[in-house]
Image (cartoon, helix red, strand yellow):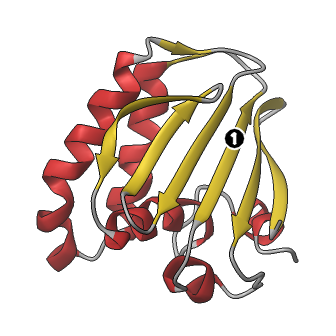
Amino acid sequence: LNGTCVRSVALFKGYASVLYLASASNISTHALFAPGPKRLQIRMLQDVPAVEFEKAFTKGMRRNAPDDQLAGLEARMAEFAQTIRAVGKVRKGDVVDLDLDPARGTLFALNGTLHGTAIAGDDFYAVLLASFVGEHPYDARMKAGLLGH
């Protein structure tokens, strides 16, 4: 367990998240690029249409991927977006696991059930995780919490 946080927008608590790393670190570059398995677990505190959930991921990834890397991520981002949209809705109490399995890639599970196929490349997971702990996170307090500050 590396760190935890609750993401709030205005007065609404949207989700609680937990970051697991093979080796704990309070440095974002280590969290993003250290080898080994990783898990970002999100527990929903509100119902959210999957399309809005997907848009947030896509926006966060675009903000954190360098322009020269983005072109190589587009097809995988579209595949990830399709996987999320296929679940229809994430509901209050649902648990989303975003795992990096070094042998397979990025895995998306909802309430313990895998959805879609593994998305290849550590680079994909690094940009996905950067949305939470990178240079341009969704929320600076969330980044601090996930990095154990």
Front in this rendered view, residue 10 or 91:
91
Give left or right: position of 135 versus 106.
right
Mark 1, residue position: 42
Does residue 3 appear in this view? yes
Question: Does residue 106 lie above or below 16 as drawn?
Answer: below
Residue 9 in sight here: no
At label 1, counting other C-alpha atoms closer than 10 Å, the crowd grade (few under 14, some 14-19, many 20 or more) is many
Between 143 and 31, the residue placed more toward the observer is: 31
Residue, x 27% and y 59% (percent of image)?
Answer: 120
Above or below for 97 versus 74? above
Residue furthest to the front in view is 103
Residue at image position (78%, 25%) is 45
Quadrant of the image for the N terminus?
bottom right
Residue 38 % position (x, y)? 60, 65
Find residue 49 and report its horizontal and vertical position in percent. Answer: 50, 15
Is 24 on the left or on the right of 54, as rendered? right
108 left or right, relative to 69: right
Q: How many marks?
A: 1
- Classify residue 15 as left or right of residue 88: right
- Residue type beneath disc 1: Ile
Q: How far across and down, in percent of the image, does residue 16 sit?
A: 79, 41
Image quadrant assignment for residue 24: bottom right
90 vs 28: above or below: above
Q: Is residue 87 above or below residue 131?
A: above
Secondary structure of the residue carrying numbered label 1: strand
Q: Quadrant of residue 79?
A: top left
**Which quadrant holds the C terminus?**
bottom right
Q: Residue at x 35, y 17 (%)?
A: 86
Q: Determine the residue positioned at 52% across, 69% down.
A: 136
